[in-house]
Image (cartoon, rainbow, N blue to C red):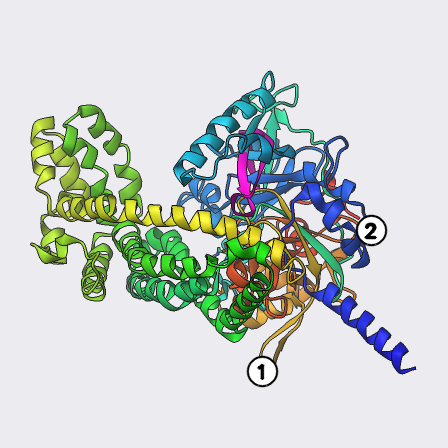
Amino acid sequence: MKNLKRLFLSILMLCSLNMVAKEGMWLPMFLQQLNETEMQAMGLELTAEDIYSINNGSLKDAIVHFGGGCTAEVISGEGLLLTNHHCGYGQIQSHSSVENDYLSNGFWAKDRSEELTNEGLTATFIKYMKEVTADVLLNETDGMTEAERREMIKSLGDSLISLEIEGTHYEAMIKPFFKGNRYFMFVTETYTDVRLVGAPPSSIGKFGSDTDNWMWPRHTGDFSIFRIYADKDNNPAEYSEDNIPYTPNKHLNISTQGVKPGDFTMVYGFPGRTDEYLPAVAVKQITQVLNPAKISIRKTALEIMDKEMRASDEVRIKYASKYASVANYYKKWIGENTGIQKTQGLKRKREFEQAFMDAVNSDEKYADYAGLLAVYDSLYGELEDIAMARDYFIEIAYRGVAIVNFANKVSKFVETGDAKDLERFKKSINGHFKNYDAHTDELLFDALFKKYELEQADSEYLPAYFNGKTYSAKEVFSKSYFASQEKLEDLLNSSTKKVQKKLSKDPAFKVASALYGHYRNVIYGKYWSLEDELDAVDREYLKAMMEVLPDYRNYYPDANSTLRLTYGQVQGVSPLDAVSYGHITYLEGMMEKYVPGDYEFDLPEKLIELYDSKDFGPYADDNGKLPVCFIATNHTTGGNSGSPALNAKGELVGLNFDRAWEGTMSDINYDASRCRNIMVDARYVLFIIDKFAGAGYLLDEMTIK
Ligand code: ARG
Ligand code: ASP
């Protein structure tokens, strides 16, 4: 009896372990080998072949890399694409004007002729992938430097690629996996005529804005709709009136069945970057040294921008997008630090390292691995100050103070005096000033450069500029040509010689060339040579841990902007003592957050009417309420935005767009007890298209279950 009980308990433990800990971003071609059994045990009703197949239409044929940064999916037989509002934001903004403000009012093409073209926007399908490790490492030798190894891989890879795509319109790329222990080739097909079909107003698509960003509970309808166009043979083509809607191999079916806690879900998309195998010393440096410095710089910048944005509508509009992008990772890093601390991430990394060293020391055949962690200690020790100096440069001179970045753009011309270089610079002027306010930038210059000088004072990498003649913000902004479009364009009417002479003495240019020069001459080379050394150790360490501790954890390749599948369960979360969050939010919650006139929490009249009349059509949950967002334990990261969340049958139930704040350390130390991805409920997407926007004709081409 006792034995039976114990057996039962251990089976239960196994099950619950299996059912909850769903860390991993898996390569589609290995699903059958590595994941199918577990996925089916969790509820998946498909086979691995249904998800990824080279020969037959599979779910992968509906997934696209959208503009190289986000994910989107085909949801109709006529090339309709679903992605996030924040992924299509640039396109929506570029079609907007004061008269046609699609950001504020939304946009819905009433028929195909109204769909809007987007120069430069791409949709890339993965045709197939294959392993090429042995081919690209053919001539690897022990004594090779990292640069030599890279060169070998590049040159062997390039010939493989040309062979592979010869006679097709496909492209291919080869990327390192498992820290460069393995290499895979991806053969891709890229469509370049991708048109905007519809987007809700920002009060839905960006509801909650930065206050709610990275937060659960969430009520953002973060979606927009595009369509791929092809030539008459269904092949990629540049925009043409003659192009026709793309006919996909496969499009996703959409389910209105909704989700319950415990339901299997998977997210299929293009996660950008993770670092799950970092040693404790690196995680400590990131969370205790580099993140705090960057957080503090961004806090200063955000406070200044916020104040100016609140004081002027013009500044608010100009800085909206910049503010959002600075705020996004500012908030993410705070969440990452808190998450590492709350989950004792460092302690757990150290425990892992102890287990690793114990195993290594217990067997002579592992002798080569015995020194790895010590090498890490010394390399990260060396890296710290230079990485910090690099972050100060990037956060302040490159990103934070626009006039410095802008002035740097003439450095080539000032050096060569070549009119062609000046022409190139001239092309950037309108774009720069369109979203620029000199007064705000002056405040940023003043505050951020004071910080730079003060906080880097003891660093051996303090730019020499700070020890020589420095410029006050006032001096720069009263004297620099770069502070005023008028003054600058006036000057540009003079002879090339005169322009060159004046700009070379411009105070903003002087600051820029001092700091960019210091970055190029002092920081860049040293930083990247240390990163090179670290790459080699990373490769060895990951190989070692997989060999020495094969069962200690899940091993999967870090995200690298290639197609991955991650799976988990719909599940609430309790990230703090006595705090527990449900798995789903409803329209009611939007009403609770509603602040009339507020730029983050205002609501469209029409939505309030629909709420009051409870006119939810077939999109309500069993309890009669209209679902908005839900969360699950899928392991996602930046780039997964716009990825479909699929149910056990492979039907679209949600659209991924964010993670819950308490779990944003998932990029360096995933923890299933806290990490949740956030999705818009598919029913809410359909409701907004149908009931709110009156664009129900779009639903006619979808397959809704
Ligand atoms: N946090 C999400 C991601 O990393 C959404 C960002 C866009 N939204 C925003 N309010 N900035 O991309
Ligand atoms: N919001 C992110 C994106 O745009 C997703 C994430 O980081 O979870 O890809």
> Looking at the figure, which quarter contains the N terminus?
bottom right
- Residue 401 can be seen, yes or no: yes
Quadrant in which residue 431 is drawn? top left
Picture disc at residue 577 = 1
Q: Main secondary structure of the magenta part?
A: strand
Taking the view exactly as shown, the residue that stands out farthest to the right is: 1
Q: Are marks 2 and 1 in contact (CB under 8 Å)?
A: no
Q: Amino acid at mark 2?
A: Glu
- Reading the chain from its start, which is encountered first: label 2 or label 1? 2
Task: Report x, y in % for residue 48.
Answer: 77, 44
Q: Secondary structure at mark 2?
A: loop
Task: Report x, y in % for residue 86.
Answer: 50, 50
In the displayed structure, 456 sits above or below 124; it is below
Distance CA(mark 2)–CA(mark 1): 36 Å
- Number of residues whose C-alpha sits closer than 10 Å to that of mark 1, classed few (under 14), some (14–19) or many (20 or more): few
Task: Report x, y in % for residue 108.
Answer: 57, 42
Give the extent of the magenta segment. Answer: 174-197
**Residue 489 relative to residue 565: left or right:** left
Q: Does the magenta segment cover residue 192?
A: yes
Q: Amino acid at mark 1?
A: Asp
Picture disc at residue 45 = 2
